[in-house]
Amino acid sequence: SDLKEKLEIPPEVPRNEFDPRDFKENNLIFLIDVSGSMIDSNKLQWLKLSVNNLIKNVRDIEKISIVTYRDTVRCLAENKNNADTAELYQLIRELKAKGITRGNKAIHFALDLAIRNYLPNGNNQIILATDGKFPFTEKDYEIWKLKTSDKKIVLSVLAFGNDKKAIVNLKEISKKGKGNFIQIETLDLAKSAIFEEVKQRSKR
């Protein structure tokens, strides 16, 4: 469709938005739900638009990783920067949704990536994008705390859709991860959500 084609084109966002004098370097892990429900409506297309808005401003000092999950967890890219933007755009463009969700396993996978590429003086952040409900138990949370130890790693959630139980679940996960919960309900919000979240977290 015309909308699909439009959303898959890297959007025009001014470059150099992340002036290094004002914003710390970022270690970002995009943890993206590609289970079957994400194909509904414009969920996946809006997510692609949001990620592309951030990629447009990636600097050479960033560490960008992309992880997808459904019935399996896959790392599509690790530790990329502005030299790899074409590759990142292509990976996002080619995302397709199918299968079922294995969310808690995916969070632990993403956390291991965040720790491996940890920036002591930077913003270390996992951005979970999903429309689904999944267990993140007290045992999962204890593992999270044990692994992070004295490292500051934030888990923020972009929630798509209006499933009430899923929203409650995802709010709790973002709270445990000491990140923000952002419900994506409009195209305008989708355009700016990840970009503004990272700006807020990385501001010196």
Image (cartoon, rainbow, N blue to C red):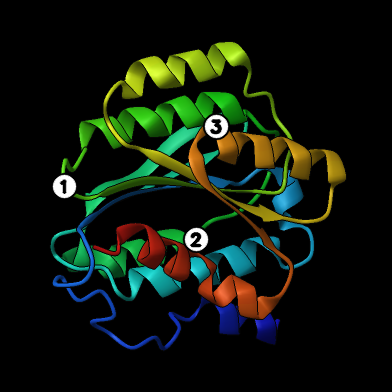
Q: Residues within 10 Å of mark 3 (few under 14, many from 20)?
A: some
Give the answer, above or below, for where 128 lies relative to 49: above
Question: Where is residue 73 drawn, in percent x and y?
Answer: 49, 32
Q: Residue 181 placed where, x, y %?
A: 61, 51
Name the quadrant containing residue 69. Answer: top right
Mark with earlier residue (2, 1): 2
* Location of mark 1 (residue): 121
Q: Specify which label sits upstream in the sequence, 3 or 2.
A: 2
Which label is found at residue 94?
2
- Name which residue lies at 73% across and 41% down: 132
Task: Residue 62: give x, y in percent of width and height.
Answer: 21, 58
Residue at image x 44%, y 36%?
A: 74
In the image: residue 87, left or right of residue 197: left
Q: Nearer the viewer, mark 3 or mark 2?
A: 3
The amino acid sitting under disc 2 is Glu
User: Circle 3 sits in a helix, a strand or a loop, which is it?
Assistant: helix
Q: Secondary structure at mark 1?
A: loop
Element under disc 2: loop
Residue 111: image location, x then y, percent? 38, 31
The image's mark for residue 176 is 3
In the picture, the quarter occupied by the C terminus is bottom left
Q: Are marks 3 and 2 in contact (CB under 8 Å)?
A: no
Residue 81: quadrant of the picture: bottom left
Q: CA distance from mark 3 to mark 2?
A: 31 Å
Report if the CB atoms under discs 1 and 3 are less than 8 Å apart.
no
Q: Which numbered disc, 2 or 1, marks the residue closer to the eye?
A: 1
Outermost residue, top side: 139
Q: Eyeballing the image, is 16 above or below 162?
A: below
